[in-house]
Image (spheres, coloured by chain):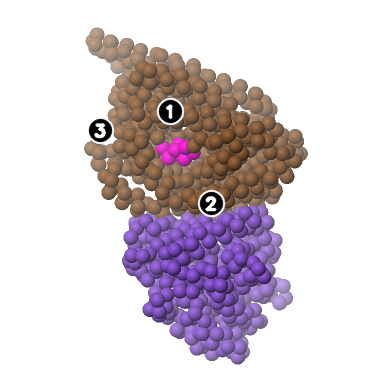
Chain colours: A brown, B purple
Amino acid sequence: MAKKIKNKEELKKLAKDFWYGKPHGERHLGELYIEKTGLYKHREWRGVSDTMYYFYNVWLYNYAMMVYDLIRYGGLGVFLKGVWRYRWVGQTYLTVMHWFDRGMEGMRGEVLRAAPWHYRGMVSETIRQFQHMFAADANLHGGKHNDAWHHTMAHNETVWGGIFYPWRDKFENVAMEMIPYFVTCHVNSHTVQNYIDAVQSIGLPGDPCPMCQAEAGLFVLDDMPDYSPFVITSNEACDASVSTSILQDWFLDKPLFAMPQPMQFDDPLVHKHCMNEIEECWKFIEEQTGVPFNWEMLKKHLEQQNELQEFEHEKWEVSAKTNSYPINGVAQALYRIYYSQDGDHEIWHHCDKKVRKVLERCVRNKTNTFPNTRHRVIAWSCAPLFFSNWPTWAYNCWGLNVIINMDSLMFDMTIRTDSYEHALEDMATYHMWAPMRRMAVGGMHHIFELWENMEKFNCDFVMMYDQLQCKGMQGVHGLFEDEFRDRNIHAIWMPHALPDSRTVTRAEIRRIVNDYMTTVMHEEPLDPSLLDFDDSMGW
Amino acid sequence: MKDLKHLIYFEDLLQEANNKLVQQAKSEGKYAIGYTCFFMPEVLLDLPGCFSVRLRAPRCTSPDIATYYMSARVCHYGRSLFERALEGGYNFLDAQMATETCTVTCRFQEHLQRMDVIKNPNFFCEFIDVPFKKTENSYVHYREQLRFHVLGKLHEKLGVDVSDEALMAAIEQQNEVSRLINEIGDYRKLDNPTITGYEFAVIQLVSLTCPKYLILPYLRETAEELKTREPDAKPDFRCKVVLAGSENDDPDFTKLIESCGARVVCDRYCYGAVESRQIIHVAEGQDPLDAIARHYLDASNCPRFMPQDVMRGRKKELARLVKEYKADGLIVASNKFCEYWSYERVIDTIVMKRDFDIPVCSIEKEYINAASGQLRTRFQAFVESVEIKKIQEGK
C-alpha cells in the first residue's frame, strides 16, 4: 500500500528522491530482489537523469549492440545454430543484461557513464569470438572444414593473443576456454557446474582446481566447437592446468604445440628459454598454416596494445591518487584481465576512448565518484568468478571500495618494438606474467607484491581471496596470516571455489564479510537490506 | 623364501631421514643435500664431498603446524615434509636443492627458504626451473639451470669439486647403484619372483635416502645373496601387477597390495626404480653435465610433460612395462590432492584398458595410509577380477 504523504516536507523529500534518487543510506537495494532469484521486482530508480541514462544509454543501447554485433560478426543464422548445439551460449547470452545490472547496482553519476563501457567492450569481444568459433565450426557444418576453419588458430585461454599478431591479417585466433568457460561463469553462475560434474563423472576427484575441471568437462561433454586445424596449449600455469591440457588433447586429437610458461621466471636463463619457446611456436604456426611470420603486423599490434597499457597506467594514476576514479571494482578487474589476455582489438580502443572522456572530466571537476567510501580495498589472489560483482555489493552495503586487484596488475608492462630482439624479450616476459603464473603459483616474491601495491594505491584494507582448491595459494595461507598480523593489516579471507557457486555460496561470502565488518571493525552497514538475502537460484 | 640378510637393517634406516648412515657421512665431514623430486638429479648431489638425501617424512600422520601454513587442502606429502622440517627432522641438511615440479613440494621448499626452519646457519635452498618438454631448447635450458643453480651454488657455497672428473666419478658411482638395483629388481621378472615388491621397495628407498658410498656394500651383498635365493615352491600371490602413480615412499603400501594377493613386480612411481635407476651414458667427448641433463629429461615419464608425442608415448611405455614384467594388471595410485596424478590416473584408467586391454585398478590414497581396510577391499576385488579374466581367457 502506498505510504500517505503527511506534510510538505515529506512531499519535498519525495520529489527530491524522485529527481536525484535516494541517498545511499536510504536506498534499501536488497528489497528490490525477488526472493531466491536475484532478479529485480522492478528496475532501480536512480533519479531521473541516471535512470534515463542507464535505461537508454546502457540497457537499451547494449541490447541493440548485442544484436548488431551478432549480425556483423557472422549473422543470426550462425548464432542460432550455435545456441542449438552448445548449451553455454543460450544460458549466458540471454542473461547478459542482468549481469550488467548486478555490476552497476547502486552506481550513480560518472561511474554509470564510464564502467558500463568496460562491460560493453567485453560483450562485444565475446560475441566476435563465439561467432567466429561457430562460423568455423565443423560440428555446425556437417563435419566439413570450411575456409574459416582453415583460417583460425585455437589456443588455451592463457596463451596471450599477442603471440598470434604476426598472422592477424590472415588468421583469427580464438582461445578455447575463454568464452565457453571463463565468460559464462561470470554471467550465469550455473552454466559451468554441468561441466565440473561431467569430468568428475569419468573419475576425476573433486579437489583439483574447479576452473581446470570445468575446462576439461567441456570436452567430456563434447561442448567445444571444432574450429581450427591445430591447437597451442600452455600450462596456464598450474599442475591441474597442465593435466587439463593433456586430457583435452585426448579429445581434440589434433596437431598440438605446447608452450608452457616457465615456473621459475625471475632468472635470465629462464627468459632466454622462454624466448626460444615463442620462436618455436611461431615456427609451428608457419608449418601448420604455410604462411610466414610477419614482423610488421606484430609490431603494429604490439604498438596498439601499448596504447591500451598506457591508458591503463593513466587510470591507475587516478585511482591511486584521487577519489575521482569512475570505474567500479568489478569493471576494473574483468575488463583489464580480459583485454590484456585477449590482446589488441578495435573494441578496446573504442571503449577506452569513451572512458577517457569521463575520466578526464572527473579529474577536472574533482568529482568524488564513490562518496560513501569507508575503506579503500585491494583485492588479492584469484577472484570468485560466480560472484565477480561482489565489489558492487560491498560498496553498497559497507562502503568497501575496491580500488585495484591482483589480476589488473599482472601484465604491467610496455612492450618494446624498436627491434625484433627487444620485442621478443618483452613478449617472453609478458607470456611469463600470465594469469596465475606471476602471483598465484611459483615465486613468492610476486605473491607478496601485495604490500607495495597497497601502499601505491593508498589502500587500507585487503580482501584476500581464498580459492579453496588452488594448491598454490593454499600453500602460502599461513605466511599471509603471519604477515597480516605483523603488519597490522585488516584483511578478510574470502573463501570460494572460483567458478563453482556450490562450494561456497554468494550468501556465505556476504556473511563472512558482514561478520568481519561488525565484529572486528564495529561498523554499521550503509544499507542493511543488503546484509542477508537469498539469491541461491540467481544467475 | 628365506629372509634377506639386511632387510631389517634397511627397514631401520627408513625410520628417520637422519638415519645412521646419514649421521656417519656427516661425521666424516660430508655435506648433506636434500631434494624431493627426480628432476633434481641426485647424481649431482653425490659429488665428492657431499651426498644426496631424498626427503621423506615416515610415520608423520598429523602435520598440524604445516597445515596452519599450507592449509588442509594440499597434498599430505608436502605438508608432512614441512611438519618434519618444523620438528627439526631435517636439521642435518646443509642445503636443499629445489624444483617447482609440483606446486605443493615447491611451496614446502619455499617455506624452507623464507622461514628460519632448518637450524643450520649455513643452510641454503636453491631452485631450478625444469622444462615441460624434451626438445633441444629444453635440454639446453635444463643443463644451464643445473650448471648455474646446482653446480654453481654447490661450488660457491660449499666448495664442492664440480669438475668433469668429479662428475664422471659421481656418474660411475650412481651407475653402480643402478646396476645393482636393476640386478636385484630383475628377479621380479621371473615367473615365480625371488624377491617381493615390498623387499624391493625397501632396497630402492635406502638407495635414495642413504649416502651412496655407505649403502653400496650392503647392496652388493644383497645382490649376491639373491643369486642363490630359492623361491617358495608354491607362489604366495594370485596375480602380478605394475604399480604406477604419484609420490610413494611408503613400502607398507606395497606390502598392503601384496597381502591381498597381488605381487608388485614393477614400480613406476615417484621414488620408484624404473626411471631413477637407469644407467647414465656419457658419449665419447660429451660434456658430462649435458649427458646428465638429457638423461633426466629423457628417462622421465612424469605427467608434467606436455608435448603430444610424449604424453601419448608414456601410455605405450606403461604397457611395455606390463609386458616386460609379465604383469596381469596395473594399479594406478595417486596421492590425495595431487593434481598431476589425479588427471593422469583418469586417463590411464580409460586409455590403458581401452587401447592396451590391461586391467586397471584406480586408487586415491593418502601419504600415510591409515585407511588400509578400504584399500584392502579394493585390492582384493581387483585381484579377483584379474583372476576371473585369466580364467575366461583359459590361462
Check if residue B376 falls in the magenta segment: no
Mark 3 sits on what residue?
A524
Residue drawn at x 52%, y 87% as measured from the top left? B4
The Cα atoms of the two marked residues, 3 and 1, are separated by 31 Å
Find out whether the residues at labels 2 and 1 contact each other: C-beta distance under 8 Å.
no
Residue closest to the eye, A456 or A353:
A456
| First in residue order: circle 3 vs circle 1 | 1
Residue B225, position in %: x, y? 56, 89
Residue A118, position in %: x, y? 49, 27
Q: For the residues tagged 2 and 1, is the chain the same?
A: yes
Check if residue A410 falls in the magenta segment: yes
Label 2 sits on a secondary structure element that is helix
Q: Given the image, on which type of amino acid does mark 3 rest?
A: Glu
| First in residue order: circle 2 vs circle 1 | 2
Residue drawn at x 51%, y 50% as measured from the top left? A268
Q: Quadrant of residue A458?
A: top left
Mark 2 sits on what residue?
A270
| First in residue order: circle 3 vs circle 2 | 2
Mark 1 sits on what residue?
A315
- Closer to the eye: label 3 or 2: 2
Left or right of B239, for residue B125: left
Label 3 sits on a secondary structure element that is loop
Label 1 sits on a secondary structure element that is helix
Q: Is residue B160 above or below residue B341?
A: below
